[in-house]
Image: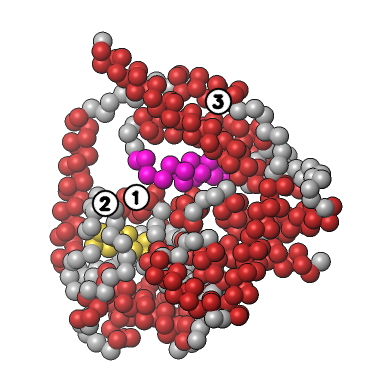
Amino acid sequence: MTRNLEIEAERQTLADEVTKLFQAYRGPLLRYLMSLGVPVAVGEEIVQEVFLSLFQHLQEGKSRANLRGWIFRVAHNLALKERQRGVRRPQVDLDEQYPCPAPDPENSAAESQRHRRLMAVVRALPQQDQQCLHLRAEGLRYREIAEVLGISLGAVALALSRSVLKATSAEAVR
Amino acid sequence: MNHISDAELMMLADNELPEDRSAEVRRHVKDCWNCLARQAELQGGLAEFLQARAGAFDMQLSAIDGPAALLRARMKAVRPERRQLPWNRLALVAAVAVAGFWWLQWDIEHPLKPDSRLTPGATMAMSREEVCAVPDADEMRLVPASMAGQVFNSYGIQPTPRIYEVDYLIAPALGGATDPKNLWPQPYAAGVWNAGVKDALESHLRDLVCKGAIDLSTAQREIATDWIAAYRKYFHTDKPLSAHASFRKDLPWE
Ligand SMILES: [Zn+2]
């Protein structure tokens, strides 16, 4: 009987921990998923699935090393699977995916136009370069990005430097 | 003096360089207008992207309370894991022990070469310039843990701390891809043709490629076909040079 109570208390603690992580990473994950072209509603479902898997992962006593990288990797893989499953669905137009920036009184019109053009250049980059940029933007370390995408650390550094230069120099030419 | 590559300047800006290399790069950049200008461009470009992206994603997410409550309810519904039966685990341990023993035997009788069916080698689509722009550092060679597990699995080996490293057949510093087809478990200590010796060969080949003495594709092919033969050829020796036996670059598998 006491054993059962202990197990229940353990589950409670884990659920609390996972909820805290959910609160911290739901926004960043949703943004990353949208940058991959996943619609918000599907993104919410994927995020749920990620944290349910995390709950099970921790319940089985598996590694707690680099949980942030783990969370993003699982989300990334689920998004790819979703995309394969979604071939028959009407393709989501990426241009419509990114919502237009709301007019911001602090930003001049010229600046927000420049930003829109920059994001358009980013959308034209190779998939993996875009993914590196968006993961970096969510604050992941290169080591974590490498783990999420299954590439080497050097490839991450190369992709980031290459695409930052491409995005901003293409921007300046216009 | 060689300039610092964009990739390394990016790492510097993001605080991603190992400490000693970071100090070196800073010293160079302080006195080099070329690198200083590129560093500013990279740093400014990244900042601009971050700003533009923040604007693009500045949307109203629905309140978190609903999704959080849904997650809690779903976690509650997950049935507690049933503990694995002990005999199950014993069978697994026995299988692993047999595999480990087989590997030891194999290791004594054969020089260390990857299984060409499991590890034929794989490269990234990179030019010589790109390959030479990425720093040749230990950090670059980290294999994602999930992929390392896959490699050990395909070779039927239990990952053993500080005995094996998962090594690249064609090193990333030579354009090798992080792909199970290009990875194999290499024991650290066994024999004279050990991991340190192969690392020494990789460093040497990279120097030759970046100096323009040999083609990148030649270096990749020779190391993938028979690295020991390549070592003998490029160092003009039958046995590994003594300085190379303790050449150590990679982190032990942990
Ligand atoms: Zn310089």
Does A78 lie within the magenta span? yes
Q: Secondary structure under badge 3?
A: helix
**Callout 1 crowding tier (Cα within 10 Å): few <14, some 14–19, many ≥20:** some
Q: Secondary structure at mark 2?
A: loop
Quadrant of the rendering where the N terminus of chain A is positioned: top left
Neighbours of disc 3 within 10 Å: few (<14), some (14-19), many (20+): some
Q: Pointers 2 and 1 in contact (CB under 8 A)?
A: yes
Q: CA distance from mark 2 to mark 3?
A: 38 Å
Give the amino acid at mark 3. Ala
Q: Are marks 2 and 1 on the same chain?
A: yes
State the residue position of label 3.
B68
- Distance between the alpha carbons at the discs numbered 2 and 1: 8 Å
Identify which amino acid the numbered label 1 is placed on.
Gly
Q: Position of residue B76 (x, y in %)?
A: 45, 19
Q: x, y (%) of residue B243?
A: 23, 80
Of the pair B216 and B111, the residue shown nearer to us: B216
Where B79 falls versus A54 (above or below)? above
Where is mark 2, residue-wise?
Answer: B159
**Residue at point 59%, 70% (across, down):** B39
**Residue numbers of the magenta segment:** A63-81
